[in-house]
Image: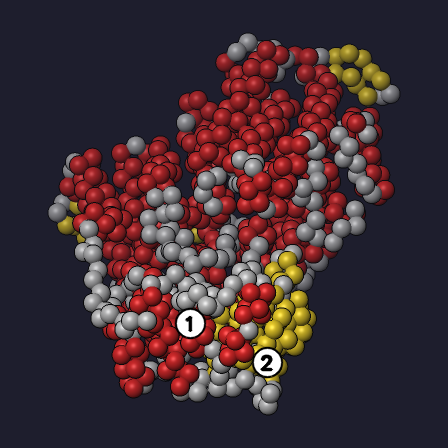
């Protein structure tokens, strides 16, 4: 045999077309925003709607990220995810209502402090609930998708009913803390302070998630596990523990989303999680199952679409998101940024 | 056993239960006189058909769909709209029923062709999204659909209490009775039809696909075509059930025929009764509707009895009956994956 | 054989309804390269996958040293020092080459001597250190796959067809790498269809047929016995 030739590897320059294809999903958001501007016309309305859309999108992203990750990593479909949203909302809002002195005070520090306590409580409770849910409801049906769907729907029903048992049959109304009420004016538009906060929180969380995924070992294990769980185990990592951790984190995030959504709507009902799940599913589908980035983009698209269409043609609002989903699935049947599975 | 297409109950207890149910439903007006019992009986008949049609999809083809209530609603609104816009009479009912069934089949075709090429989970989520969208749409297009309030309409006089025919065994024979027997007779025929379908060569291929779709495709069956057909058939029968419901109730509204709660109820009935058996639908629907009507009263009394104890009265609050059914549902999936029918037949 | 690194006794493995391994008895000596040969479909890959734990043992024992491991999880077996290079390479395409290697050196950083050795053996890995592993060519991916198992010292290396589909030039790079591993005293169980490679590396040989070990011996013995070659594997090693 001859000596091995010098390895002078070359890589074909990535064609422009290919590079565009990769960036396309990201570009959709600004494209949609622009289209919205053209359709709506007035800058002030457009601005208000865009901020609303982004805020809503961020909150849906927070709720959806856990679900898509759990599916991508564990191949588990959790139709009960909505329960965590509702429970988080109820726990968080209850804490908030009990801190009336803090929320009523005209002090940003106290207000934010109250909200943070509420969020903390919500995330702890939903995290624990998630741990229990994984152990009792999900674990026995690993690998059986049909049973997973059925059992998690059952779990959803039971948890929702328990909310009624603990908090009563009625919805609970609330108002936002003093300093978070009202709006700021910008370019002639009234933009609610809370919505700006929601956008900020969503962005921070997204960046945080990216950092964890790309720069920590745990993130590495999760990313590798989403692609090929078997190999990750063969490298010596106890994937089970990572699974449970991700499930708990996903549930806690849903709880956070619930609190934020509750503050956004200023009312909470036991069925709110269930109602959000439609949009969450749409986001997860168009983002690509298992992709957090896809969910982020998808959520922004859904939030923007919902708000723009609600303004332009109110009766078509929900259908518009189905339409969005149809269009994206026809373009990319696996979602925008599907995870490449090794299976 | 030709009438059952050769699909015998295969368990003495089950046969007895089915016979009891059949006799009670057939003779309901005479055995259980009273408006409430007749309502319950009619509801049982209709839900048996609805759940059995879902069983065709879930139990025999292995497809999870959350759009079933939508098809039910299509059939119901079909009859309602026809009755509102056409002259009172059986013609309107016929037109509405056929229109509803055809619309359901077509919609199922569209959804099926689009979604069955994607993964099963996608399909489930997509059906959920579409069904909610339709429910919202119906509520909002109030000019056509009557919106949140729904539609009231008249049905042929022969099916109303005003139409009198005398008395038999102390029970008044009137249009309401005839209406009931229309519901009962049609339901019976539809169930027998479903039995025939699942036991035909078509039905066997469905089961093969459910077990292992790769192999079925490899053997030469175009899996997509079979799944789409099953979806359309299931949708059409659901729509027929909806039409019967509309005829019986003389009212349709988003809450009564399109709510997600009904979808959950169907899931509970089919799992508790036993998937992939058709008879499971009969048993499941009966238990569920009876529970829905009578368990709540029971729970109410129980709640009163433990009024002083913390938390218990809230758990036994009749409005919380869904909680217990949910628990039963989860337990069924784990411990009785074959449902009551499966258990009775002695399968693990 | 005194103190084999790996022993299989009467191992039966099922995959779905198929009874693939039908009583495998095998002892892998320490510090040697044992070739696992046989026709397609006889169960070689299944054997490796059973040892690492991806497939469960239905019956029989697996001993690592003198320690039974059949009840341990995949991760726990890997932690004992068993390295696995699967047939499909199992590299993580979405992760960079660097990230793939970081994951492979589970117990901490790779020491620089080892890193230099890997770069010297597989230069493309250094070039594409920060590129996504999915953009590598087939041969380069195979290199990464082996490099990963070299990231730490392992007690036992299970390697499944490392040269499958590779160009001859790259094959010789592979063989060189495996020879170096062997020179360091590694215990390797190697499945290979390419007989030139088998002959170049193998010390001991186990040939499988119908889910069982049909022949064991040294490489030299098998190389000399053309009848055995033909009957066991349907071809001769002459044609290289």
Q: Is residue C233 above or below residue A284?
A: below
Q: Residue at x 34, y 66 (%)?
A: C168
Residue B318 placement (x, y as % from top left) = 65, 48
Res A57 seen here: no
Residue density around tag 2, few if under 14, some if 14–19, many if 20 or more, within 10 Å: some
Residue under label 2: C27
The secondary element bearing badge 2 is classed as strand
Q: Which residue ends up furthest to the bottom in the rendered image?
A: C2
Residue under label 1: C197
Q: Residue at x 52, y 27 (%)?
A: B104
In front here: A113 or B188?
B188
Res C193 seen here: yes
Question: Which image quadrant for residue C133?
Answer: bottom left
Q: Residue at x 67, y 41 (%)?
A: B276
Residue B189's disc number? none
In front here: C197 or B17?
C197
Q: Contact (CB < 8 A) between labels 1 and 2? A: no
């Amino acid at each position: 045999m001859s000596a091995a030739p010098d390895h002078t590897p070359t890589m074909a320059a990535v064609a422009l077309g290919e590079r565009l294809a990769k960036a396309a999903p990201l570009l959709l958001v600004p494209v949609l925003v622009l289209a919205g501007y053209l359709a709506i016309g007035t800058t002030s309305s457009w601005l208000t709607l865009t901020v609303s859309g982004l805020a809503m999108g961020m909150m849906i992203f927070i709720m959806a990220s856990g679900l898509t990750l759990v599916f991508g990593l564990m191949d588990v479909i959790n139709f009960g995810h909505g329960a965590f949203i509702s429970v988080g909302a109820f726990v968080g809002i209850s804490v908030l209502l009990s801190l009336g002195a803090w929320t009523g005070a005209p002090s940003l520090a106290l207000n934010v402090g109250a909200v943070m306590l509420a969020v903390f409580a919500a995330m702890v409770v939903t995290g624990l609930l998630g741990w229990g849910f994984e152990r009792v409801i999900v674990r026995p049906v690993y690998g059986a998708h049909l049973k997973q769907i059925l059992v998690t729907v059952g779990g959803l029903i039971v948890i929702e009913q328990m909310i009624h048992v603990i908090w009563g049959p009625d919805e609970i109304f609330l108002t936002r803390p003093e300093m978070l009420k009202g709006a700021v004016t910008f370019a002639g538009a009234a933009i609610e302070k809370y919505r700006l906060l929601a956008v900020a929180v969503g962005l921070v969380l997204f960046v945080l998630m990216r950092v964890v995924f790309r720069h920590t070992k745990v993130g590495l294990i999760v990313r590798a596990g989403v692609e090929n769980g078997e190999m990750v185990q063969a490298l010596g990592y106890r994937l089970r523990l990572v699974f449970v951790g991700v499930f708990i984190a996903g549930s806690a995030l849903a709880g956070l989303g619930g609190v934020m959504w509750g503050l956004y709507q200023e009312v909470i009902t036991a069925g709110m999680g269930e109602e959000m799940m439609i949009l969450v599913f749409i986001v997860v589908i168009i983002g690509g199952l298992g992709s957090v980035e896809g969910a982020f983009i998808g959520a922004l698209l859904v939030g923007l679409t919902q708000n723009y269409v609600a303004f332009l043609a109110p009766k078509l609002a929900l259908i518009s998101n189905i339409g969005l989903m149809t269009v994206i699935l026809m373009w990319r049947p696996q979602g925008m940024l599907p995870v490449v599975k090794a299976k | 056993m030709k009438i059952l297409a050769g699909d015998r109950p295969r368990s003495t207890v089950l046969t007895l239960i089915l016979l009891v149910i059949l006799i009670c439903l057939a003779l309901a007006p005479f055995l259980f006189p009273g408006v409430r019992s007749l309502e319950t009986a009619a509801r049982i008949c209709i839900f048996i058909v609805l759940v059995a049609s879902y069983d065709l999809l879930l139990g025999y083809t292995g497809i999870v769909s959350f759009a079933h209530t939508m098809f039910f609603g299509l059939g119901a609104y079909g009859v309602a709209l026809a009755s509102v816009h056409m002259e009172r009479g059986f013609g309107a009912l016929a037109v509405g029923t056929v229109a509803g069934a055809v619309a359901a089949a077509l919609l199922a075709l569209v959804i099926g062709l689009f979604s069955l090429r994607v993964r099963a989970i996608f399909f489930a989520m997509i059906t959920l999204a579409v069904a909610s969208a339709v429910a919202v749409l119906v509520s909002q297009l109030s000019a056509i659909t009557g919106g949140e309030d729904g539609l009231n309409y008249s049905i042929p006089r022969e099916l109303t209490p005003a139409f009198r025919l005398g008395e038999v065994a102390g029970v008044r024979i009137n249009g309401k009775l005839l209406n009931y027997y229309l519901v009962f007779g049609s339901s019976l025929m539809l169930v027998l039809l479903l039995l025939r379908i699942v036991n035909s060569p078509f039905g066997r291929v469905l089961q093969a696909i459910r077990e292992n779709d790769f192999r079925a495709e490899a053997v030469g069956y175009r899996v997509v075509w079979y799944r789409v057909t099953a979806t359309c058939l299931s949708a059409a029968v659901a729509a027929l059930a909806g039409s019967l419901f509309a005829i019986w109730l003389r009212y349709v509204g988003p809450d009564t025929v399109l709510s997600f709660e009904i979808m959950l109820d169907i899931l509970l009935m089919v799992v508790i009764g036993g998937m992939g058996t058709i008879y499971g639908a009969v048993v499941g629907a009966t238990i569920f509707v009876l529970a829905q009507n009578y368990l709540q009263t029971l729970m109410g009394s129980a709640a009163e009895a433990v009024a002083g104890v913390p938390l218990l009265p809230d758990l036994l609050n009749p409005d919380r009956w869904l909680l217990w059914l949910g628990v039963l549902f989860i337990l069924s999936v784990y411990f009785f994956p074959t449902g009551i029918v499966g258990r009775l037949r002695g399968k693990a | 054989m005194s103190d084999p690194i790996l022993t299989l006794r009467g191992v039966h493995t099922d995959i779905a309804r198929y009874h693939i391994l039908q009583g495998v008895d095998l002892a892998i000596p320490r510090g040697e390269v044992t070739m696992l040969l046989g026709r397609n479909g006889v169960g070689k890959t299944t054997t490796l996958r059973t040892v690492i734990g991806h497939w469960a043992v239905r019956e029989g024992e697996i001993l690592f040293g003198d320690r039974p491991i059949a009840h341990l999880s995949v991760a726990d077996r890997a932690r004992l020092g068993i390295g696995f290079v699967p047939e499909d390479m199992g590299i993580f395409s979405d992760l960079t080459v660097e990230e793939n290697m970081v994951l492979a050196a589970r117990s901490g950083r790779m020491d620089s001597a080892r890193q230099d050795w890997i770069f010297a053996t597989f230069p493309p890995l250094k070039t594409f250190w920060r590129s996504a592993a999915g953009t590598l060519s087939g041969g380069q991916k195979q290199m990464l796959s082996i490099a990963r198992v070299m990231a730490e010292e392992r007690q036992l290396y299970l390697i499944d067809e490392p040269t499958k589909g590779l160009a001859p030039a790259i094959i010789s790079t592979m063989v060189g790498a495996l020879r170096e591993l062997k020179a360091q005293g590694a215990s390797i169980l190697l499945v290979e269809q390419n007989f030139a490679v088998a002959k170049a590396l193998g010390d001991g040989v186990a040939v499988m047929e119908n889910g069982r070990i049909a022949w064991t011996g040294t490489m030299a013995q098998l190389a000399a016995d053309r009848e055995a070659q033909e009957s066991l594997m349907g071809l001769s090693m002459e044609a290289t």
